[in-house]
Image (cartoon, rainbow, N blue to C red):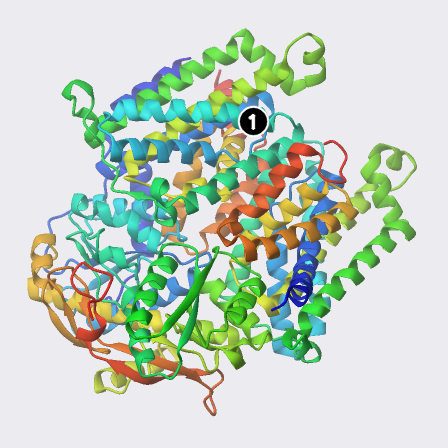
Amino acid sequence: MDLLPFLLTQSLNALSQAALLFFLGVGLTLIFGIMRIVNFAHGTFYMLGAFVGYSAVRFTGSFWVGLVLGPLVAGGIGVAFETGLLRRLYKRDESAFLMVTFGLTLVLGEVIRLVWGVEALQVPTPETFAGIVFLFDEPFPVYRLFLAAAGVVVAIAIWQFLERTRLGLLIRATSQNAEMVHALGVDVKLVRSAIFGIGCGLAALGGVLAAPLVTASLGMAANAIIDAFVIVIIGGMGSFLGSLLAAVLVAFVQVFGAYYFPDFALAAMYLLMLLVLVIRPGGLLGKEA
Amino acid sequence: MPLFALATAALVAAPLMLPMFAMTLLTEALILGLLAMSLDLMVGYTRLISFGHAAAYGLGAYTCGNLLLHTTLPLPFAVLAASLLTGVVAIGVAWVCTMAKGVSFSMLTLAFAQLLYAVAFKWTSVTGASDGLAGIPRRAGPFGITVFEGKTGFYYLVLACLLGSFLFCRALVNAPFGAVLRGIRENEAKTLSLGYNTRLYKIAVVALSFALGGLAGALYAPFAGFANTELLFWLFSGQVLIMVIVGGQGTLLGPILGAAFFMLLEHVLSAYTESWALVFGLIFIGFVMFVPQGIWGLVTRTRRARA
Amino acid sequence: MPHCAGLSRRRLVQSAVAASALGLPVPFRTATASDPIKIGMPVGLTGPIGGVGAQMRRACEFWAKQVNDKGGLLGRPVELVIEDTAGNPATTVRKVQEMVERDGIRVITAIVASNEALATVPKLVEWDTIFVSGDNGDGRLTGESLSPNFFRPNVSGPMGTRAVALWLRDSPLKTFYGLGMDYAWGHNSMEVFEAEAKRAGKTFLGAVFSPTGTKDFSTYITRIRQSGAQGVYLVLSGDDNAAFLSQARQYRLGDKVQLLTELVDQMTINATGDASIGMIGSSRYPFTYDIPANKAFVAAWQETYGRPPDLFEGDQYQSCVVMQAGIEKAGSLEAAKLRAALEGLEVDSIKGRVTMRACDHQGAQQGFIVKVVKHEGMAHPMPEVIATYPADRVTPPCNKMVYDD
């Protein structure tokens, strides 16, 4: 393959991967940034999305139903968890959050295993995007193009949400000064529930979209949580734009790194994380923590 | 503290009262207890939340394992050497990590630990890569002492290390050094303004914490006879952190109880049901909601209630 | 007469929990004729390897019920002591230690992951316990890491690779590339493949290894395509295997390059659907193998579980049968006697004849090459046997992982 076609194809691969990483990271950065919660269960919500997607396809034949249902179910559970448990812990220190989300990971993970079983489940690529296009005579999956596009669409949607809607405004304000928002008469509790639910929902969205590529399996959660952490840290906690940037950066490093230095594939992401943290401890676009 | 004396006496007498399989479990619980206690120095006393403490364990285990497999160093010396090496390496890691504060610090510890995992996974000649080191022997002690090769002798070695480490830590936190740590925990800016080089103190506590964590790992290697990359994985780091929290952070003894509790609970639950993770998770959530002071809080509350 | 078929641990544990909480040993009477024969199973039932663990457990339970329905083993009921290790080697060692020290168990099987097996094997002699492997394929377990108490009736990684290589000798494909998981098994099998491909006069263009947990295989697919190879040898398992196959299908890789693999299992086929059609590889146990012993087994299995047995189920079942034959011949569970009985033992089982070699405790047996095809009326594609190779060609020389011819 000549250099230009190679670069183009690999860049497209990286962009599709970046989209998945972005969905994982943006949810966590919202939760992390505003609530200072280390959400251990984030990977499990991602996994939940994939399994709900599987069931949606199995019972309704439509991937699109899964795309809506996955985030809704995850968001619902997230909101319930926040109002039921997390809400009582805001006056405590971080270790309480660590332990309670750790417990949630265990419980939710086991529930998923009980409901869907131990075997990996296939989520077929949706018909519309199951084909291929030819880039310089080499087949390239349409689904990956769809993923990259979905990443862009969702990024714009979140951006507009944060900038233009009332809830978005409240979220941004709460991340800067929760007390002031409270003093202005806004029910900060509702804002927090919304953030947690949206964060979990976004993770699940990533899971549904990833499922046709990797199958819905129980090992997804552990992988996903570490990816999510890395994105949030590199991008900067609480920074939406940061998570977008970090997702693209990490994806490109992974794709091109795995090609040119396969021996370092495992270490690449952590080296990058270390490098960024040493140069800018708050992450690329974050405030100093 | 009469309770402490009673507990120590019970532990010393344990081999006479407990059957062999219980002794094996107890030995491992004490090793994990040492690991959790070492993390408490960072988490409980200095509020340095580390997501990478598995690195200390793994470093200690691999170093000791290699020393026992490839040199003629007697067991106690190999254990101590591994612990020292881990502490020294930690100075470098701490120097980098303490450039950041708060959550960034925590994430740097995670990054380092995962890097170590990645390196260990690939470095076949030193770590055996994904297989790890197997068949680690318990070599005879100095001057022909063979007592540590047997189960009971090894148990006493572990107990001695745990007791010694605890006394050392307790002396440390009661000394002016400990007061500075608590100052950093409560208000670092103020402590800094009082003239203390808080960064140096943080590096010191991380190094000590790692040295003791490495001691635990160094004891694990000859105990189990193997060392592998699972010991370095971030999931294990998270579990050690949970042990500290559930035991009661900032109490030294609490985390030891937390570690024993965690290990034994998982062990018993998983023999009883496949859905042990569900029960396990619910118990931890329960602890957060209803027992915020951790196990140690329960213990001291009962004592106070009786008094 | 024994009437409790394949008791699982649950009921016993309640009293054991109470006893162990007090630090008291579970009362241990001297064994009598009606005392159950306990087989320890530290099997990973939760976590990413849960699917394989579930298969191994099912196979053992099936076997134990069969044995107990016929009057038991040595006239005593078989009791399976099953505990979840979640694939963690530290937990495995802890649990086996307890099985040995507290429950007096002397025979274990059904360890899922190779790193769990590698952590356990060095202690077998100290525990005076025999370990009969159900699916552990690491070449070194009968090579440099051999323990006198370890026995492997199942197919090893090198044997699987060898079968594929033998099939390639007659195939028109000439050039090959490799993709393996970046840990011991991946590298080991790839080494064997490279040597065998060269011996067969084929061209080995190179290999690349992906870290465990890789989710995006696009780079690796690119490499395979760029190499220009006609066939690619895959040494992948679990989630990585399923992800690769799904993505390879999306890139239409199989249209240009023949997919060859060391492991063909139904679980992966079910998870990847059409993506695995046309794949050729080694099968440690193909349920379509047409001999009376296997037909009977498959029929009985189908009746119990409603579907044919999969790869790990068949392999573990054969291991249980070998273990049973050994125990019957030895008349005892004592390690020294059982070891002597197993060495050189020949058993005719569902895969044909298995001979447990005395020199390295590997079960010499034939190798199967299968091709995944679509079957009318079946929900998923299935592996069909397209070649069989005799035991002496597939099993490596004693204590070795490489072949001489």
Q: Which residue is mark 1?
A: B43
Name the foreground residue: C296 vs C120. Answer: C120
In the rendered structure, the answer to whether residue C61 lies left or right of residue C392 reads right
Image location (x, y in percent) of residue A263: 48, 51
Picture layout, residue C225 above or below residue B141: below
Left or right of B175? Residue C312 is left
Chain of residue at mark 1: B
Q: Secondary structure at mark 1?
A: helix
Q: Nearer the viewer, residue C69 or C122?
A: C122
Which residue is at 19% across, 44% downward?
A: C27
Residue farthest toward the bottom in the current orientation of the protein: C376
Q: Residue at x 16, y 25 (%)?
A: B146
* Residue A217 percent coordinates (x, y): 53, 63
Dividing the image into 4 quarters, which one contains the C terminus of chain C? Answer: bottom left
In this image, A204 relative to A169: left or right? left
Does the image show residue A85?
A: yes
Residue C330 horizontal/vertical position (percent): 7, 62
**Residue B222 placement: quadrant:** top left
